[in-house]
Image (cartoon, helix red, strand yellow):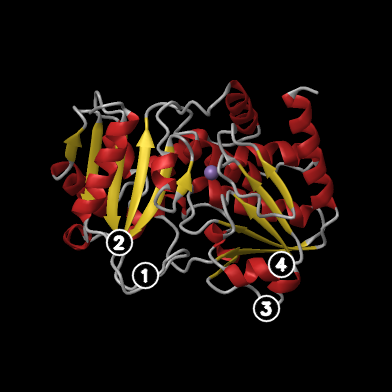
Amino acid sequence: MSATESIDQALESVADALRGERRVLVTCHVKPDGDALGCLIAMHRSMIQLGADSRMYLADTAPIAPEYRWLRGLDDIYFGHPPEDAASRTLIAVDCGSAERIGNQDLVEAAPRIINIDHHADNTRFGTLNLVISGASSTAEILYFILKKLQMELTHEICEAIYTGILVDSGRFQYSSASATTFRVAADLISRGVDHTAIFHQVYETVTLAKTRLLCRLLTNMTIACEGRLAIGVLDRGDFESAGADNGLTEGLVDNLRAIEGVLVASLIYARPPGSVEPGDKDPAQIHYRVSLRSSSEELNVQSIARAKGGGGHNQAAGFTAEGETIDEIIAYITESVARLLDLD
Ligand SMILES: [Mn+2]
C-alpha cells in the first residue's frame, strides 16, 4: 500500500468519525497562531454543517494576536472557561502537538473521546483517534482534505480560515513543507473567492507601531554567534514596556533574524509577563522566558534543542519555556547546542 493510499484511508476514517459526532468541543493550542485559529473556526463551522452541536474553546484568556482579529467567528469562542457541559462532549483538538498544549488538563482527562488532528512531527498521539500528517504544511491543509471527504460546502468563512492557516504555517508558501499540493489547495481556495491580497494585507501589513518598535529593539540588541550562522534576539520586560507593546506582539519577529545573510539558525528569547501561568510551568513564581528557534533547512533540527528543555515543535520551528534561568544562561545553552548542530568546535 502506498503512502498516499494510507493517508487517504486515514482521512476517510477521521471523516467517518466526524460524521458520527453529535456534540463536540473544538479546541486548539494556547497562544494560537493563524493555523490554530483557522482550523478552530473551519472545524467548528463544518461540524455545524454536519448537524452537530459544536462549541469552540480556547484555554487562553490573552487577547488574540492583532493580525488574526479580523477572522470571522472569533466571537463565538469560549475563552478561559469551557462551556458547562464540556466534559460530556467529544474533544476535537486541531494543531495541538500534545494534550498539554491544549492548556486544560482537567478537560482532557474528562473528555469521553478525543479526535486529534495535527501536523507536528512530535505529536504525542494523545487522542482516541489520531490523524497526524507531519509532512503537511499546516493542519489547515489536512483539514481541507477532510472537508473534501465530508463533501462539506466550503463556505467563504471556511475557505478564508483554511487559507489563513496554510499561509501562516507555510511561511507564506516559502517553507519546505509548502508542497505542490499546498499550492493546489491554495489555488482552489482562491478560485472559490478567497481574497489572498486582502488576507496578506491583514496578516502581514498591519504591523502596529508598538510591534515595529519592539522589532527595532530586538535588532539593535541582537547577538550574532557561531561564526555568523546563529542570530539571537532578546526581549526583556523593559523592552516591552519601552515599546508600549504586550506579549501578543512577538509572532513572526524571529523571522527577521533568520532572514539575515549567512544565518542558519535564529532564536528569539522573550520574557513572559510577570504572573502569567502557562501549561507546563513548575513554579509560577519564577521568571519565565519563552524561546523560539527557527532553522533554515530540514537538516538543522532545532526541535531537538527545544525538546531537551521540555519543549517541542517541528524540525525547522520549535520552542521551549525556560524556567528560573537567566538570559545569559539561555543564550549559552542555545549557542552551545547550535555549535554542536553545525559541527563547530
Ligand atoms: Mn500548525
Q: Nearer the viewer, mark 2 or mark 4?
A: 4
Q: For the point 58% across and 37% down, which residue is it?
A: 194
Quadrant occupied by the C terminus: top left
> On the image, numbered disc 3 is attached to which residue?
84
> On the image, numbered disc 4 is attached to which residue?
111
Q: CA distance from mark 1 to mark 3?
A: 25 Å
Does the beta carbon of the residue at mark 3 sit less than 8 Å from ligand 1?
no
Q: Which percent across, then down, holds residue 230? A: 25, 33
Query: Residue 235: in sight, yes or no?
Result: no
> On the image, numbered disc 2 is attached to which residue?
246
Q: For the point 56% across and 49% down, which residue is it?
A: 97
Amino acid under disc 3: Glu
Q: Nearer the viewer, mark 3 or mark 4?
A: 4
Q: Which percent across, then down, holds residue 137? A: 55, 34
Amino acid under disc 2: Asp
Neighbourhood count class around disc 1 (C-alpha, 10 Å): few under 14, some 14–19, many 20 upward: few
